[in-house]
Amino acid sequence: MRRRLIPAVAALMWCAACGTPADSPPGAVTCESGPRTSLATPGDTQWRHPDRSFYAAGDPDVPTGGSLEHLIVGDNAVIVQYSPQLPQPSVDALRDWAAMQTATVAIPGEAEPVIRAAIASTELTCDGLDTDQLTELARSRAPGQAPDHEAP
């Protein structure tokens, strides 16, 4: 019985800070939800599917606004933009979170807001990383399948 408890205790200890940034007390992150704004600029209609779920600051192949719009509207994806000032432990937590999600891409964004996450209908802006709220947004996507399509 003792051997069975060790993995459970280890999992609880590992996830003790899940959902909050490493440098903030639990519950300190504030998020606001509202209608989504476009991630593309006018005329930015070219798109490609990204190669991975997380892009670091300075990566040369970060998806464009047209690609992000396609992912949200055409593929029912979650797009997370994070501030370059996000502390490294939170960046690492976001990378891990994005890797475990379906149809999710995290990219560097503007300095403000710290986190901007979007699905087809909704945008969530946060003053820090809260993966619980990101998960709730991801789960709120309307179920369904994106039509088959190829890049232009």
Image (spheres, rainbow, N blue to C red):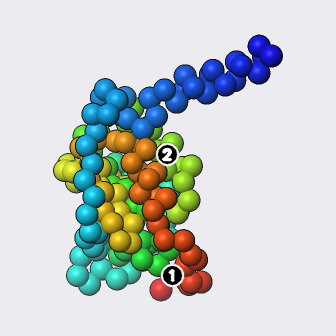
Residue drawn at the location 32% of the way across and 34% of the way down? 27
Q: Is label 2 or label 1 in front? A: 2
Please tell me whether residue 114 is drawn above or below residue 102 in the rendered image.
above
Image quadrant where residue 93 sits = top left
- Residue closer to the observer: 114 or 150: 114
Please tell me whether residue 80 is drawn above or below residue 12 in the rendered image.
below
Please tell me whether residue 147 is drawn above or below residue 60 in the rendered image.
below
First along the sequence among labels 2 and 1: 2
Q: Amino acid at mark 1?
A: Ala
- Residue 116 at x, y percent in the picture: 29, 55
- From mark 2 to mark 1, how far is it between C-alphas? 27 Å
Query: In the rendered image, which residue does mark 2 sit on?
Result: 97
Q: Residues within 10 Å of mark 2 (few under 14, many from 20)?
A: many
- Residue closer to the observer: 48 or 79: 79
Residue drawn at the location 80% of the way across and 16% of the way down? 1
Query: In the rendered image, which residue does mark 1 sit on?
Result: 151
Q: Residue furthest left?
A: 112
SS for callout 1: loop
Q: On the rendered structure, is 32 left or right of 50? A: left
